[in-house]
Amino acid sequence: MDKSSTLLVHYDKGTPAVAKEIKEALEGNDVEAKVDAMKKAVMLLLNGETIPQLFITIIRYVLPSEDHTIQKLLLLYLELIEKTDSKGKVLPEMILICQNLRNNLIHPNEYIRGVTLRFLCRLKETEIVEPLTPSVLQNLEHRHPFVRRNAILAVMSIYKLPQGEQLFVDAPEMIEKALSTEQDPSAKRNAFLMLFTCAEERAVNYLLSNVDKVSDWNESLQMVVLELIRSVCKTKPSEKGKYIKIIISLLSATSSAVIYECAGTLVSLSSAPTAIRAAANTYCQLLLSQSDNNVKLILLDRLSELKSLHRDIMVELIIDVLRVLSSPNLDIRRKTLDIALDLITPHNINEVVQMLKKEVVKTQSGELEKNGEYRQMLIQAIHACAVKFPEVASTVVHLLMDFLGDSNVASALDVISFVREIIETNPKLRVSIITRLLDTFYQIRAGKVCPCALWIIGEYCLSLSEVESGISTIKQCLGELPFYSISEESEPTETSKKIQPTSSAMVSSRKPVILADGTYATQSAASETTFSTPTVVQGALTSGNLRALLLTGDFFLGAVVACTLTKLVLRLEEVQSSKTEVNKTVTQALLIMVSMLQLGQSPASPHPIDNDSYERIVLCIKLLCHRNDEMKKIWLESCRQSFVKMISEKQLREMEELKAKTQTTHAQPDDLIDFFHLKSRKGMSQLELEDQVQDDLKRATGEFTKDENDANKLNRILQLTGFSDPVYAEAYVTVHHYDIALEVTVINRTKETLQNLCLELATMGDLKLVERPQNYSLAPETSMQIKANIKVSSTETGVIFGNIVYETSNVMERNVVVLNDIHIDIMDYISPAVCSDVAFRTMWAEFEWENKVAVNTKIENEREFLDHIIKSTNMKCLTGPSELEGECGFLAANLYAKSVFGEDALVNVSIEKQTDGALSGYIRIRSKTQGIALSLGDKITLKQKGSS
């Protein structure tokens, strides 16, 4: 049988106390030694020891003590010891403590009386309590409030016992009388709590007769009032109106805890706009007045819930919510921005963007180390605003472009992505954006930002002046050509006396050689010639951002420069009438491309140019040498069309997600509909009127009916033993976020009583049992339910295994029934989530745990296999539908999910169709923790063979 514990004591693990030592200390006269011995005895009892031999010693040597600490420890000891035998009867020796308790209840010291009354609150044995009831009632009128408040609690606890109403027949009347005269706040709270618990009607009458005084009551009493209101409104929903008025009056209380509870109670009881508005305003005021970050996060969670249920009302408070951005905590700021972005409307967009702009400007002046991350969050928020409402883009785009040279690369990347999208969706801003970009291009220092900026220049420079400015800007940022030079010196100069290292080349006839990548090349050389080591020409290293990045070996950027120059030259050919100028520009572009190739193949470069970049630059050279209309169309139109298609798909995907979120439940055809206008409104306040309207609307739209799917419940039942076992057991598993609840039904299938039946469980993985196993007796052919709670500390597949042990009456040997294992699925802890491509790539590079699973499946269609993996892993596919279209024999997709513990799970699926029709490839899983990577890998290995 489960026993509730009322003690929580710190236990320092060490050498356990010995009963003999405790006994000797208790028999001595040293008070400190007795205190220490009593503490050890209490510890032993808490850890499951019975130590019956100490009872008489404690009665003889501890009971008479006048020391307050010893008396308190004595009461803790008496609270923990077993007071009944196996049949539930009170042990005879317990009579010895009754007289002591009676003496304590009439003791002249208030502390002794108070702690004894508190001890009586935890006594469940009627035989021990019954002789003490007169003394308890006397303490209700004691002069000291400490005694009175504990006496009221003792009366409440005794009255709630199975035969308590017989012991205290008129307890509610006495407590109501005491409540009307009581002045002590704590005693008053306890008295009201007793009426609420044991005589709710009396508590309601007292509350309604003192409505005007409620706002002046003590904080603790106001909290009990709110609890009473919630209880009454659940049982009598029709009377909500008069109680909601009380709650709204309490919103002006001085205690933050009371105000918070009021707001929560209002939301739970009413959907009236006035009530919801009052609750939302309360949360916003608390957000600004509270300094604790955890409190702010909880309040933001409440506002987020309100946003999902009552968006129209929350829209009015968007500026109040945004004021929380003054908090320096990034989590609070992130959550605030998430809430605000869902509340944007055409009416408030300008105010919101103005406020976000001010915050962006503040990040420039501040010295906080997190300013870069905060700026990135603000830029993403402004980006989202501009996508929803393109008309505001013009007010923010130029401000954000000042941050293209930001030291925080992620922030600069967000800015350039924003600019790229806005320049396409807002054609009116094209000229001003291009002009500003060309003016600020030299400030960009990040290798990841430059390619995107160059792409914008190549695609959106349309007029003659823009094209010429684009080419000129790129040339300036590249600096003087060549990127390196070989200076031939026969003698050391006077200024440099150091010997220059030399390099030599051997002369031989032309012959083919095999390169490191397996390709063939022709090698030719002349007689051995000595050169000085190639030296990099610094040129504009400090000012030319493209040059600086190229000299560090960023040849992907070199390929982007070549493509941009090619597009600009092709565009120049369309807008420039002078062929001479076009040819001159072509020559300059070819010189730049050849110089980049030379740099990539020279020893001066940190590493050789990669094959992809090399081929891309060579392709640009060939195109400029042999220009034709077909290639011009591909380069100048197709790229832009692909980008437009990508943006439109993104918007379509967002619209579909929004539609899915806004879908509401509908009422059944045969449900009752109340016509509100036909109802009587006599005597109803505006608030009651609104509340009734909202209730009717909820009933009509089916929000009040929550159907529980019984079929899903049946799927959760796991059979633990066989039908032929003497004990049959099955478990109903409920997985919550941080714990697992097992409800095990045990059936005795034999004709005899099973004694000391115990369900013993053990776990593997990051699972931890909470309770100790209890012993039970099970009558023939009867059943019982045993509950077990298991804490979960991380997202990992775990296993629960165990057995049932029991004894029978005729054979005193312990019998064991081994249970089937219960596997806890990782799918219960992860849910589909969305992140940007940039964030996915960043996490992919950072996460250290990777699990690589080879594809082994009977499915022959690439898309079908991907859908099967998505369904099996409960993940979200980040790769767009258009990117997965077509039949090319190859498919690559990224999947993402988030666990309830906030852990990220990344999956990359790369598969190829073989000539025989089978699929091959790899599925890579990456995460920050080992558990997710291994568990997801096991899940995929298990599921991938099946068909969808």
Image (cartoon, rainbow, N blue to C red):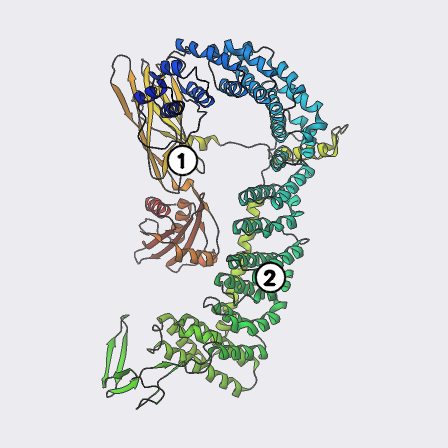
In the drawing, what numbered circle is on residue 791? 1
Name which residue type carries label 1: Lys
Q: Which residue is mark 2?
A: 361
Quarter of the image for residue 822 reads top left
Residue 908 location (% of width, % of height): 39, 54
Image location of residue 501, percent across then percent down: 28, 82
Cα–Cα span, label 1 and label 2: 46 Å
Q: Residues within 10 Å of mark 2 (few under 14, many from 20)?
A: few
Q: Is residue 286 left or right of residue 133?
A: right
Report the front residue among 631 and 350.
350
Quadrant hosting residue 234: top right
Nearer the camera: disc 1 or disc 2: 2
Q: Nearer the viewer, residue 805 or 631?
A: 805
Find the residue positioned furthest to the right: 682
Residue 751 falls in image quadrant: top left
- Asked if one can make out residue 878 in the rendered structure from this viewpoint, the answer is yes
Residue at the image point whose x is 58% and y is 18% from the top: 198
Q: Quadrant of the C terminus?
A: top left
Q: Earlier in the sequence, mark 1 or mark 2?
A: 2
| Label 2: which secondary element | helix
The amino acid type, in three-letter code, at marker 2 is: Val
**Which residue occupies the foreground of this view, 196 or 720?**
196
- Secondary structure beneath dot 1 equals strand
In the rendered view, tell whether residue 8 sits above or below residue 921: above
The residue sitting at the left extreme is 508
Instruction: Estimate the x, y position of residue 475 in percent, counting from the top left.
Output: 49, 79
**Residue at 40% across / 71% down in the picture?**
554
Disc 1 + disc 2, Cβ < 8 Å: no
- Tell me: residue 554, above or below residue 943: below
Mark 1 Cα within 10 Å, few/some/many (few <14, many 20+)? Answer: some
Label placed on residue 260: none
